[in-house]
Image (cartoon, rainbow, N blue to C red):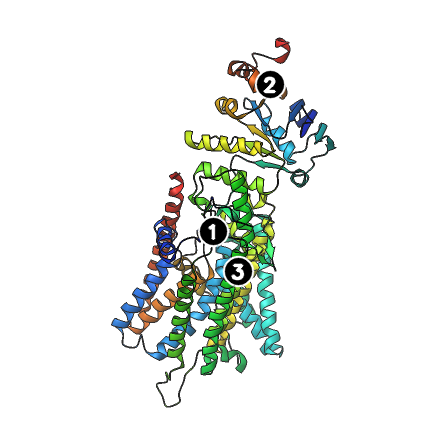
Amino acid sequence: MSAPQLIASGQEGNLREQVNAYFQRVKNGDMGALPAVIALIALAVLFSTLSPYFLSRINFANLFVQSAELTVLACALVFVLLLAEIDLSAGVTAGVGMGLFVIMNQMMGLPWWIAVIGALVLGLAIGAFIGFFVAKIGVPSFVVTLGLFLGFQGLLLIMLGDGGLYRVEVPELLAIMNSNMPDWAGWAMVVIMVAVSFALSMWDRSRRIKAGLPVRPLSLLYIQLAVLGGLSALAVAFLNDNRSVSIIPISGVPIVIPFVVAIIFVGTFVLDRTRFGRHLYAVGGNPEAARRSGIKVASIRISAFMICSSLAVVSGILHISRLGSVEASAGRTIVLNGVAAAVVGGVSLFGGRGKLIHAALGAFVISIIDNGLGLIGLPAGINFLVTGGVLIAAATIDALSRKRSGGSLVRT
Amino acid sequence: MDTPLIELSGVKKSFGPVDVLKGIDFKAYAGRVTALVGDNGAGKSTLIKGLAGVQPYDEGVVKFDGQEVHLGSPRTAGALGIEVVYQDLALCDNLDIVENMFLGREELHMGTLDEASMEFAAMKALQSLSVRTVKSVRQKVSSLSGGQRQTVAIGRSVLRNAKMVILDEPTAALGVAQTEQVLNLVRRLADNGIAVIIISHNLADVFQVCDDINVLYLGRMVAALKTSETNREDVVGYITGTKSMEEVA
């Protein structure tokens, strides 16, 4: 079986040509996560010059832990943003999930893991509810979820009582955000990440070779894996160092990190390599074309909202784990940061473009702004202003790059 | 000539009190390009939607490859090998060419998308049409020109092993060079043994590429001509209703 040689597939050429092709794509407006990466580096440089504590080991670990909730919420929102929909109720959905956890665990005395499952099922149900109104009845998602945003704040008040604050003392849950893995487990995590990425790439590669299709140079794959492995090894080495400011040593990778990495990895696998993921992008790009191709648009929409709401509950569980308590106002403010994180990372508000890793990078940008401004002691008002400014800047980049890639229509 | 791939006789369709198709006879042959022309409101779209199974005909006999069939839904039409390329093409801008060509019919390998075999099949389909205008099959459709998009949409029907491809205004909104490309593509499609039906307002295109010309006028088929045996003036006459087959005869 020999491949037709008339049309290229974008995988031809040596390393240099591949790199040139990448820059060409960036120039054409397909920037992906590039702006977020640049912002990340710029912010890190800025804050490390402004505050001696920014690059300290303890702050580095804090950054990861602080950004975990936001990262998971931003990933949740990607699934609906890809459809050009929005879920403003994701934060309070997390709140209601936490409320149900408290009711099941504290008031009814059920084991913590049953309460977690209960909260996740509630998340699925809320997602199905939103999806039904959006996909079957045709109410704009902005309106449905704005309604739930208000309603669920009330629901959580009723569930927990006015001004209620419930302590959650479940060591297994609290460990996620507050305990660290032994050194070897951190290294094992890096090895697994690199090995799985390598195995998947080689699998794709072998199938392309079997079909007689051109493949990218292996050197490119090795460089990508070296960057992935190098950066994560650096982070693990840093985290495995003692970061305590008291006599009791603290070291190791926080347990939450492999959790978040797994969510990003599985989600990316679903979006990039399954039929469901492909259909999700298709519905986000052109719902009418998707419908005519036989894709069940309504069920794709409903599933996306279900994934979003249940992942939002996961971020709520991380919230419980970090604070060891649930407050009646839980989840009110985080959702806009979640949307900001996704958009800053390069997920398009117009639908059809974006990846989970973009949302994770964006969440890191937002968390660094929060963390850095706190360290240099600026008032909280400035924090909101800067975060808001970054969101508008990111949305502007999104709109402009969309115009640009649309503009290339004129080319023949 | 051998049996037509599709043969309509006495096809009728009405929407409430309005009779849109008043008993149409129509034939299209494998390996030939058949034009369907007529002024706005003549019933071209309704005739096509019936063939696509989107709006089934009320009355009349439809024969596909000599067998009587009922085109009751897009699914039955698709199963017979009837593909329609609508004017808006129905492509997803955010997906690449391969992804668009396989949209809704993705091939799987162990539960995951089989990108390699889809890419191979897409290349082969485009190659069978001698497409040279597309740089890479992994280009996003948003970066393609109008003619290239038409190419992708037509390539998709080839990929689905279409026996009959219906093109709705394929050259509308295209420049001169791109129109030429698409018309060449249409010719090759027919040369590959597919029955091609083109709806067009552009008589220059019709005379350049079509073998047969069918003219609809107010819900009736007023002329079925061979391109080689007619001229532009006559066809315009049929379209505007100043001429009819009976007069000629």
What SS does tag 2 mark? Answer: strand
Q: In this view, does A411 lie above or below A222?
A: above
Report the residue marked by disc 1.
Answer: A351
> Where in the figure is residue A246, as x and y percent of width and height?
36, 88
Q: In which quarter of the image is residue B113?
A: bottom right
> Where in the figure is residue A8, as x and y percent of width and height?
45, 47
Query: Residue drawn at (46%, 33%), measured in percent from left and top?
Result: B181
Mark 3 to mark 1 CA distance (whole Å):
33 Å
Q: Are marks 3 and 1 on the same chain?
A: yes
Foreground pick, B3 / A6 = A6
> Where in the figure is residue B49, as x and y percent of width and height?
62, 33
Amino acid type, callout 2:
Leu
> Where in the figure is residue B98, as x and y percent of width and height?
51, 48
What SS does tag 3 mark? Answer: helix
Foreground pick, B237 / B58 = B237
Position of the C terminus of chain B by quadrant: top right
